[in-house]
Amino acid sequence: MEDKNEKQITVTSPLLPSLDEFIPYLQDIWDRKWLTNNGHYHQALEKALCDYLKVPYISLFTNGTLPLICALQALRITGEVITTPYSFVATTHSLWWNGIKPVFVDIDPITCNIDPDKIEAAITPRTTAIMPVHVYGTPCDSQRIQEIADKYGLKVIYDAAHAFGVEINGRSILETGDMSTLSFHATKVFNTIEGGALVCHDEKMKKRIDYLKNFGFADETTVIAPGINGKMDEIRSAYGLLNLKQVDNAIKARQQIVSQYRKELRETKGISLMDDISGVRHNYSYFPIFVNADEYGMTRDELYFKMKEHNILGRRYFYPLISDFPTYRGIESAKSDNLPAATKIANSVICLPIYHNLSKLEVELILNQIRK
């Protein structure tokens, strides 16, 4: 088999609806002449997602960051919020935009999620909430987190950007906490090109969120709060309805790729993997490997760039840690001494290419490069 593949293998590739199916939806939107502001397809997608995700209320947004910002507004969060340094920057940027100080605690090196054992020590009189992340779609220890939140009277907002469709024993992980947010970016298992959603548990809060994402308008002349413009348009809502029809098949295809990766890399010295958790319906949104340079004979970065030379684009996700970026570097909790597990994981991770139409041949090319 050729070592150097001519075609670039990207870390991900978007799930796209059939153009033949999409065009009639577009024609209907053109005929209706209602492009945004809670239109027909927007309402249809919210309902369909509630059914698929097994949640009572969901509010669509134009991207995955605005739900985080609006969740903090809707719950009137202030002061300090305990969160993880091992995530995409949108998690803590949402806090910054709300004038809230992030307090970083270390992660569990097995799940890469926030370590519940580290949370209590970080709570101060200014703490008002915890913002955990279901990293790579792996569920957080929500029971432990909720026990801590209840003990100290804190709200819990989950960044579930990676966790579309993830369940534990048949129940959606989006049921946990006060709210959960989702991302429907093009790189995600389910996408609306750009998009996102905010999940809540009662009708009153759903109305408040809908006001907040539409400038605070309650009716034509009443503005109840200084809201923002976060509405999803009709075209992306229709696109999402079509993608929802095929997302289960896409997840099955991803699962097969994960099985192939695990089978072939399990015995590769210096490479460690994450396994499925019993009782969890995973969505296989990412496939991270962790490189032990001493055992593997090559550093993570050396492997990353060697793969790149062979047109294989992995991603060091998440590297650097959020706490290492200039915006947050001055925060006491951001010091690397406070975050040994997160620092080690960030310096050893590569997410391998994974998407629904990644071929077996391409997977073999990736595996061959790593095994060498």
Image (spheres, rainbow, N blue to C red):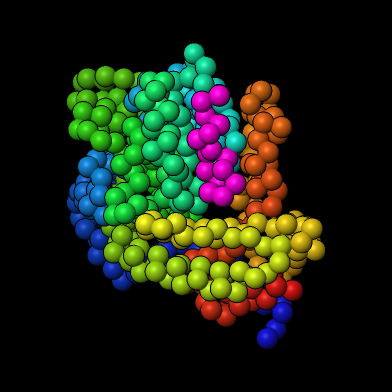
Residue 331 shows in this picture: yes
Q: Is residue 292 shown left or right of residue 244?
A: right
Which quarter of the figure has residue 300?
bottom right
When asked about the image quadrant of residue 188, the answer is bottom left
- In the image, residue 37 lies at what x, y percent? 26, 39
Boundaries of the magenta span: 107-122
Question: 247 and 6: which one is in front?
Answer: 247
166 w.r.t. 90: above or below = below
Give x and y (percent) for residue 10: 59, 65
Residue at the image position 52 percent from the left and 43 percent from the top: 113
Query: Was residue 117 drawn as part of the magenta stretch in this picture?
Result: yes
Q: Residue at x 64, y 76 (%)?
A: 365
Most foreground residue, 28 or 342 = 342
> In this rendering, does residue 63 appear at all?
no
- Residue depicted at x 63% and y 60%: 272
Image height check: is 136 above or below 86?
A: below
Q: Looking at the picture, how far across and down is residue 49, in whole percent?
A: 27, 51
- Residue 197 or 283: which is nearer the viewer? 283
Predominant secondary structure in magenta? loop
| In the image, residue 197 above or below residue 208 | below
Question: Image quadrant of residue 344?
Answer: top right
Q: Residue furthest bottom?
A: 1
Q: Is residue 252 magenta?
A: no
Task: Give the total of numbered labels.
Answer: 0
Residue visible at 51% across and 68% down in the picture: 258
In the visual, does 15 lie left or right of 100? left
Q: Position of residue 54 (x, y in %)?
A: 25, 49
Q: Is residue 22 left or right of residue 266?
A: left
Quadrant assignment for the C terminus: bottom right
Quadrant showing the N terminus: bottom right
- 79 or 169, nearer to the observer: 169
